[in-house]
Image (tube, rainbow, N blue to C red):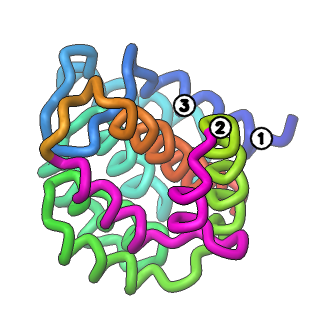
Amino acid sequence: MPNSIRSWAALKRLIETPDLPGLGPAPRAGRLPLTELNCKVDCFLEEASLPSTLHPLVRSAALLWHDYLDESHSLSQDIHTADGSFLHGIMHRREPDYNNAKHWFQRVGKHACFADIAQQVARLLETKREKELAADLAPRGDWDPFAFVDACEDVAIRPSSDHQVQTLRAIQEIEFDCLLAQVFAK
């Protein structure tokens, strides 16, 4: 297994939570306390031998996954790459500040992980018989982050137990995983 894949798998295990992050800003009971999370990320970064330029991105992603939106935002706003803009867009989508999220996704441009996101989302939605949602989110096999922002906004007032909300949370995990797999592959 290549070192980059091992590193991504190790980070994924490190930041794992009992349930998926919500589409909004509400913190989950299963998130790690901030000091514990930062300590774990520090140890990971020390052991992973990643370029120092990736450290803020990895920490921002871990914070975002654990619902520390403000802390993630403080880092992602200073990461002037498509990857940083992508995390920044996810954070604003969850905040929720949908227009600002779209601004940051526009800054992302066509990210290298979009095709992978589209493929995995299409597969997931095929199993759920959600053809219309698949056509909106992954038209012609390409990921549309703006349509995903709209889909999240459309369900914002629904309870987390709602079937559509659960589906979008699973898609958000795919998006997050594909982004970080791409980051670690560099």
The earlier-in-sequence mark between 3 and 2 is 2
Q: Is residue 85 above or below residue 53?
A: below
Residue 110 placement (x, y as % from top left): 57, 82
- Going by the numbered disc 3, the residue's amino acid type is Lys
Instruction: Give the residue drawn at x 67%, y 53%.
Output: 122
- Quarter of the image that includes the N terminus: top right
Q: Is residue 51 visible?
A: no
Instruction: Give the residue drawn at x 48%, y 24%.
Output: 14
Q: Name the element at disc 3.
A: helix
Q: Name the element at disc 2.
A: helix
- Going by the numbered disc 1, the residue's amino acid type is Asn
Q: Name the element at disc 1.
A: helix
Whether tag 2 and tag 1 are in contact, CB under 8 A, the answer is yes
Instruction: Give the residue drawn at x 21%, y 62%.
Output: 92
In the rendered image, which quarter is residue 111 located in? bottom right
Residue closer to the observer: 32 or 133 = 133
What secondary structure is the stretch in magenta mostly built from? Answer: helix
Residue carrying label 2: 7
Mark 2 nearby-residue class (10 Å; few <14, some 14–19, many ≥20): many
Q: Is residue 117 above or below residue 104?
A: above
Residue carrying label 3: 12
Instruction: Look at the image and give the residue range highlighted in magenta.
Output: 129-156
Residue 183 placement (x, y as % from top left): 60, 58
Q: Is residue 142 magenta?
A: yes
Q: Is residue 28 left or right of residue 123?
A: left
Query: Alpha-carbon distance for marks 2 and 1?
Result: 6 Å
Whether tag 3 and tag 2 are in contact, CB under 8 A, the answer is no
Q: Is residue 101 left or right of residue 128?
A: left
- Quarter of the image that includes the C terminus: bottom right
Residue carrying label 1: 3
- Going by the numbered disc 2, the residue's amino acid type is Ser
Q: Is residue 21 visible?
A: yes
